[in-house]
């Protein structure tokens, strides 16, 4: 197995493009003898004459012309890889916040598209609860946030809406037991609305967890020790939507809202437009602005 050396390839490309060793050496900031030695090493490695030295001006042989096509591609690919891995200079940074239950599938698709267009703009994804993201936006710790709310607040723009569903363990019976065992984390935006509807229907209930961790909530629900509520499109495989037949109140819909766009025309505005398009394509647009 013979491996091409990137330094010798770079010298070979320079000689071909500059039309001679002297100019190539100057362009590479090397001595003429160093460039000549690298060309000799390359020819010995391949067992081919790459340069026609019969005239005063160096020309490529047939093998040299063939190698030049590959050499340019290899050098360019090398420089691209090194640049992507070592260049930490960004043209800007955007902090995007989103609740974990609406990250997939839209946000990754949008970020992939955005990065292809603006590779030097760093996007920091902040995943948290709606309440914490709203606080972060007010404190200036996030530039653009997505939320799940029944109605958008001041400055909020609704991108789409999604049904909120009762969820339980697959085949579970918790929703039939009295009192109704509920599991919501302390910072869950759905909690107050669900309790309001349960109380309005006169259902006796008990909260069985005191935690800020959504995964702990899901663990209790999947063990059929309680029921909870999730957006229809975010129900994981280890839980299922409950068909209560009216035994539990309908939970209505939640709106996915965006804050921080403000009709901006800069790079942040471009990201906001991509999020609008992504959520519109996923479920259909809802034009509501507060």
Image: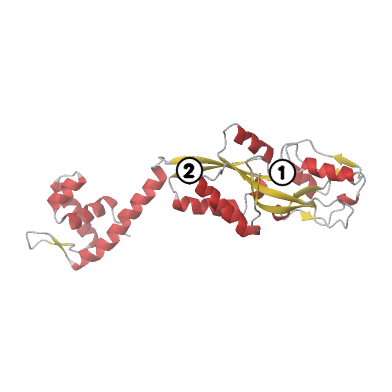
Residue at 57% across / 55% down in the picture? 277
Which labelled disc corresponds to residue 122?
Answer: 2
Q: Separation of disc 2 and disc 1 at Cα?
A: 29 Å
Judge from the rendering whether residue 284 lies leftward or rightward of residue 5; answer left or right: right
Q: State which quarter of the image contains the C terminus.
A: top right
Q: Tell me the residue at 83%/52% (across/down).
A: 250
User: How would you rate the neighbour count of disc 2 (Cα within 10 Å): few for under 14, some for 14-19, many for 20 or more?
Assistant: some
Q: Secondary structure at mark 1?
A: helix
Q: Is residue 235 visible?
A: no
Whether residue 55 can be seen here:
yes
Q: Is residue 111 above or below residue 154?
A: below
Position in image of residue 58 (x %, y %) = 12, 59
Seen from the viewer's position, the closer of residues 75 and 203 is 203
Q: Which residue is mark 1?
A: 215
Residue 2, image x and y in percent? Answer: 30, 59
Q: Residue at x 45, y 52 (%)?
A: 117
């Amino acid at each position: 197995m013979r491996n091409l050396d990137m330094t010798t390839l770079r010298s070979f490309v320079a000689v071909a493009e500059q039309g001679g060793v002297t100019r190539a050496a100057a362009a590479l900031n090397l001595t003429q003898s160093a460039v000549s030695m690298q060309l000799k090493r390359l020819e010995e490695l391949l067992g081919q004459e790459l340069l026609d030295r019969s005239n005063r001006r160096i020309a490529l042989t047939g093998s040299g012309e063939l190698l030049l096509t590959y050499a340019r591609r290899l050098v360019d690919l090398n420089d691209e890889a090194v640049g992507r891995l070592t260049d930490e200079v960004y043209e800007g940074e955007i902090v995007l916040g989103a609740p974990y239950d609406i990250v997939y599938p839209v946000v990754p698709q949008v970020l992939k598209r955005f990065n292809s267009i603006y590779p030097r703009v760093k996007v920091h994804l902040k995943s948290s609860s709606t309440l914490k993201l709203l606080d972060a936006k007010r404190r200036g710790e996030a530039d653009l946030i997505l939320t799940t709310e029944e109605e958008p607040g001041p400055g909020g723009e609704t991108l789409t809406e999604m049904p909120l569903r009762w969820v339980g363990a697959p085949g579970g019976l918790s929703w039939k037991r009295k009192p109704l065992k509920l599991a919501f984390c302390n910072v869950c935006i759905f909690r107050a609305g669900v309790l309001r509807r349960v109380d309005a229907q006169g259902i006796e209930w008990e909260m069985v967890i005191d935690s800020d961790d959504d995964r702990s909530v899901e663990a209790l629900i999947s063990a059929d020790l309680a029921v909870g509520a999730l957006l229809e499109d975010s129900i994981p495989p280890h839980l299922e939507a409950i068909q209560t037949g009216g035994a539990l109140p309908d939970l209505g819909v939640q709106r996915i809202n965006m804050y921080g766009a403000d009709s901006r025309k800069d790079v942040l505005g471009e990201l906001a437009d991509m999020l609008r398009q992504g959520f519109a394509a996923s479920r259909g647009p809802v034009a509501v602005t507060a």
